[in-house]
Amino acid sequence: MLRSIGRQWCCSAAFQCRRSKRAITTIVGQQLKAQEQQLHEQQQQQQQEVHKIDDEVSRLLALKAKLGGDAAPANQKFTLKTPKGTRDYAPQQMTLRQSVLDKIVQVFKRHGGEAIDTPVFELKEVLTGKYGEDSKLIYDLKDQGGEILSMRYDLTVPLARYLAMNKISSIKRYHIAKVYRRDNPAMTRGRYREFYQCDFDIAGTHDPMLADAECVKIVAEVLDTLDIGDYVIKLNHRQLLDGMFEACGVPASNFRAICSAVDKLDKSPWEDVRKEMVDEKGLDGVTADKIGEYVRLSGGAELVERLLSDEKLKAVPNAVKGLEGMQLLLKYCALFNLDHRISFDLSLARGLDYYTGVIYEGVLKGEQEQGPSAAKTAQNGEPATSEAGGTVGSVAGGGRYDNLVGMFDPRGKAVPCVGVSIGVERIFSVLESRALANKTKLRTNDVEVFVASAHKGLHEQRLRVLNQLWAAGIKAEHSFKLNPKLLAQLQHCEEHQVPLAIVLGDDELSKGLVKLREVTTRQESTVPLAELCAEIRRRLSP
Amino acid sequence: MLRSIGRQWCCSAAFQCRRSKRAITTIVGQQLKAQEQQLHEQQQQQQQEVHKIDDEVSRLLALKAKLGGDAAPANQKFTLKTPKGTRDYAPQQMTLRQSVLDKIVQVFKRHGGEAIDTPVFELKEVLTGKYGEDSKLIYDLKDQGGEILSMRYDLTVPLARYLAMNKISSIKRYHIAKVYRRDNPAMTRGRYREFYQCDFDIAGTHDPMLADAECVKIVAEVLDTLDIGDYVIKLNHRQLLDGMFEACGVPASNFRAICSAVDKLDKSPWEDVRKEMVDEKGLDGVTADKIGEYVRLSGGAELVERLLSDEKLKAVPNAVKGLEGMQLLLKYCALFNLDHRISFDLSLARGLDYYTGVIYEGVLKGEQEQGPSAAKTAQNGEPATSEAGGTVGSVAGGGRYDNLVGMFDPRGKAVPCVGVSIGVERIFSVLESRALANKTKLRTNDVEVFVASAHKGLHEQRLRVLNQLWAAGIKAEHSFKLNPKLLAQLQHCEEHQVPLAIVLGDDELSKGLVKLREVTTRQESTVPLAELCAEIRRRLSP
C-alpha cells in the first residue's frame, strides 16, 4: 500500500508546476504525518518484540559463558577478517600515513588552523536531510534503547552541528578523523567504507572570496608538500551552474538532480550523462544539448570574460553573480601564484547538496602507473576514467556552504563556511605503490640503541643499562630472552635498522666499560659506562 | 519459557560438582543449539518485517526530500547535542590532549613501540565471549544487510584479532584510539561512552617477567613525564588470586565471579564485597572471611616471602607459581628503580576476564582537588572512593593475557601478550581542572605573524606578503575583511597571542618597506620587504 502511494506521489511530484506545489505540499505533508505515526507505532511494536528476543539471547549467552567458565571458547568458525570495506594499518602503513598527516597538519597550521574533534557518531537527526541521494549510505547504530545514532558520513555536518550548538560564528578549524559510508567499495582501487578525511574549514562572515582563495591555496600547498606528482585544481561556482541551468531552460526544481548528473562527467562520457538527464531526469533533449555546450568549456580569466558577454548567461542574475565571483577568485589565486595550477571548469559539479558557492577539486594529472582508470571523488579515492581517457585522480575537494550551519540553529542564524577536504586515502595509496615500486622500506620504530649480551647471565646488567638509557631519553630495547645468542641480537639490529648496539661482556663490565657498535659499519669501540649516554647522543646527533 | 529454563540452569550450573560438568555441558549444549535455531528463525522473521518498514521509511524520506527541494528543512526540533556520554573537543581541549598524547607516544617509542590501527568496528563475533559480564555494554550496529558489526570495546581484542589474522607472533605495538561502552556514565566525573585508550602491548614468547617489568616501567615513565602528581603502581597476579581462592576453598567454577567481586574493593568497603560473595555468588561466610584476610594485605618483597611460607598457600601450586612470579617481577622492578613506586596488593583484581598472569594499576595518590571521590577503573577515568577514604584515581592498568590470541587462531596457537592501557581521559580531566585552577590559557593555534593593513585598499598587498611568508614556511594569517580597522587587527593579535604583526601602509610600501611589530612589547621597527622572512625567522628563533 505504502509503496503504491509512494510511486504515485513520485510521478505526480516530478511534473507539478510550481504554482500548485505549495498546496500539494500541505496535503501531502498531512498524509506523511499520518503515515509516519502509523509506522512509528508499528516500529515500536516490532522493537519491543525484538528487544524481548535480544534479552533472551543475552541470557543464553551469559549461561553459555558460565558453563564455559574462563576457558577459551571452541575456536571460532567465522572467517577472521575486518568488516567489509575496512582494513587494518600495519606499522609500515602507519609510518607512511603519519608522515603524510604530519605534513598536511603543518600546512593547516601555517594558515592558522585550530584542531577540534567530535564523536564518531551523531544523533541520527543531525545527519538526516544533509546528503541527498547518498543518505542511504549512512551507517546506523542498532537501537539498544536510548538515542538513535548514526556514524558520521563526513566531517562537515558535524562541524556545522558543533558551530551551531556552541554559537561559534568564526573559526579556522581542521579535523582529521575517520568517516563511514556503506558503499560497495572497489577496494582493489583503494576505496573503503571506513576512511580518513582531513578537513580545513573557514567559518565566518567575510568579504567575498578571500577565505575561498585561501582554501584553494591550501590545496596547492598540501599537494606541493606531499610531492605526489603534477596536478590541476579545477574551479567552478554553484551559482554559475544554477544560472547556466536556468539559461538552458531547466526547471528550478530539477537543478540539483541535473547538477548531480553533471557531476558524473568525470567518469562517464557526455552521451551517458545526457541519457541520464533525458531518460531518468525528464529533461528535454534540446535543453540537455545546451547544457552539453557549456560543460565542455574550461579555461582561465579569458573564459570568464567570454561567458560574461554570453547572451544567454548575461540575462540570468545567478549566472552573472557566479561569473563575477569566479573573476575575483581567479584574481586572488593569481596573487597567490596559482595561475599555472588552476582551471575554471564548467563540468565540475561536486556531489554534495550543501554547496552554495565556489567549488573546487584537486586532480592528479595522468598517472600512468594507476592503470586505465582515474578517480572521481576525492573522498574515498576511487579512481575512474576521465573523458579524455587519461588517468587522473581527485585528491582534494571542497567549496562554499553558506546554509548548513543555519539548518542547525534554532533561529536559522547562518554562519557562512568554506572548506576543503584532502583525499588522504588516495594519497596513501599513491605513495604506498610508489614505495613498493622503489622497494623503499620505512623504519617502523625509532629505536636508537639495542642493548645486547655477549654471553650468558647478563640480563640484569642489561636492565641496569637500559634504565640508564631510558632515563636519558634514549630510545632503547633488548631481547626478552635471558640468554639470547649474540648473532641473533646483531641480526635483529640490522633487520630493524637500529643504528647503534651496546654489547655487554663480563670482561669490559669488570672495568666499568661497554662496547659500542655502529650497526651499519660494524665498527666497535669501548666506552666507559659513565660516559655512555653522552657518547650515544654525540653519535646520534646529525 | 526461555526465561524460566534460564533461571533453572543458572541455579543448577552454579552448584555442579566438576565431575558431572562435562556431561551436563553436552546436554545443555544441545538444548542451547535448538533454542538458538528457534531464536534465529524468529529473529529473521522479525528482521524481514523491520526491513519492510525501513524500506517504506526511506521511500517516504526520499519523497519528503523531493518535495522540499534543496531548501533547508524547517529548523530541527530536536535538542542540539552530542550523543549521550560523548563530547566534542574544542581547540583548547585539543591542544591539551595533543600535548598529553605526544608525551605518551614519546615514551612508547622510547621502548621500541610501533603503531598500528584497526577499524572502529569489528565483526560482532570477534567481540563475543571476551568481556564476561560487560558484554552488555557493547554497541551494536544496525543490521542494514551484510555483516553484523559491533563497535570496539577496547583495543586489546582487536590487537589479538590482528595478530591471529596476520600470523604475527612477536610485536611491540602501540595504539591510540577511541573505544565505545554503552555504560551509564557519570560524566560530571569525567566518564564517557566514547573515550580514548592509549595502549602499549608486547606480544611474543619470552622469558618470564622481562616484558611484564618493562610494561610496569612504561606506566611509571608515562606518569612521570605527565607530571600529574604522586602515584603508586599496584601489582598482583591472577595465578596467585586463583591459588588464594583455591586455598580458601572457593570452587574453581566460581573463581572469576569471586575475582570480579574482589575487583570492587577499591570502591566498596569489605563488608559490601563480602555480602556480594555470600548473598549473590553463593560463597559460604567462612570462605569469604578467609579471602578477607588475604585481600587486606599489601607490601613488597617481604610480603611475598611471608606468603611463600603461608601454610595454606604453600599447598596450592597456583599460589606458589604466582608468588614466584611476583618475586621475579619485584626484582626486575627494583633494577628499574621502581621500588618506591610499586606496591604488591592482594586486593587488586582487574575487571576483565582475559588476564592470566601479572596485573597492575597505576593510581594517583590523594588528590584533594578531585573532591571526596576517587577513581576505580583506568579505562574511562571514573573516580570512586577508596576504602581508606582518601582520594585516588586509577590512571593506567593492564596485565598479561596469554590465551586471547589463541581464541582467534583456527588451530588455537597461542601468542602470549602483556600490555598496558593509559587512562588518558582521567589524565585530561586532571590536567584540565589544573589549567582551569591556574587560569592557564593554552594557545590553540601556532600563528607566528599577523599581516595587517594600516588603511584601506591594501588587501591585495596583504595577499602578496602572505604568499611570500607561506612560501618561507612561516605561519601567517590576516583578516578576511577588505578593509579591517587597524585597532581590531592588533587586538586580535593580543587576544590570540600572535607574537609578531606586519603593518602594511602605502608610505612604507612605496619605499619597499613594512613595519614589523612585536605584539607583547608593542615595539615597531621598519624592515625592507626583501628581508622580511629572514628578519621574522631571526625574531622567532629562541
Image (cartoon, coloured by chain):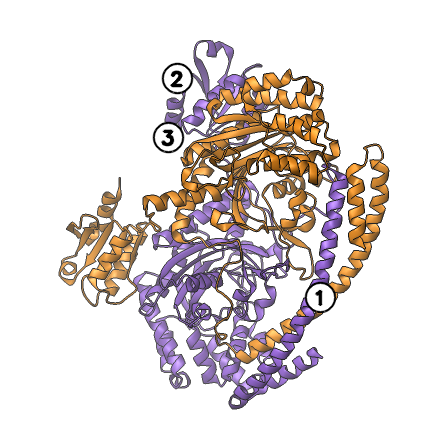
Chain colours: A purple, B orange
Residue holding disc 2: A530
Q: Nearer the viewer, mark 2 or mark 3?
A: 2
Q: Nearer the viewer, mark 2 or mark 1?
A: 1
Along the polypeptide, which appears first: circle 2 or circle 1? 1
Residue B399 placement (x, y as % from top left): 59, 33
Residue A309 placement (x, y as % from top left): 36, 82
Quick check: can you spot residue B105?
yes
Confirm whether circles 2 and 1 share one chain.
yes
Write down the chain letter for disc 3: A
> What's under tag 2, amino acid-wise?
Ala
Above or below residue B477? Residue A103 is above
CA–CA distance in space, label 2 to label 3: 19 Å
Residue holding disc 1: A46
Q: Nearer the viewer, residue B290 or B502?
A: B290
Along the polypeptide, which appears first: circle 2 or circle 3? 2
CA–CA distance in space, label 1 to label 3: 68 Å
| Contact? badges 2 and 1 (CB < 8 Å) | no
In the image, what residue occupies the spot 63% across and 83% down?
A9
Write down the chain letter for disc 1: A
Residue A250 placement (x, y as % from top left): 50, 84
Quick check: can you spot residue A434?
no
Q: Nearer the viewer, mark 1 or mark 3?
A: 1
Along the polypeptide, which appears first: circle 1 or circle 3? 1
Residue holding disc 3: A541
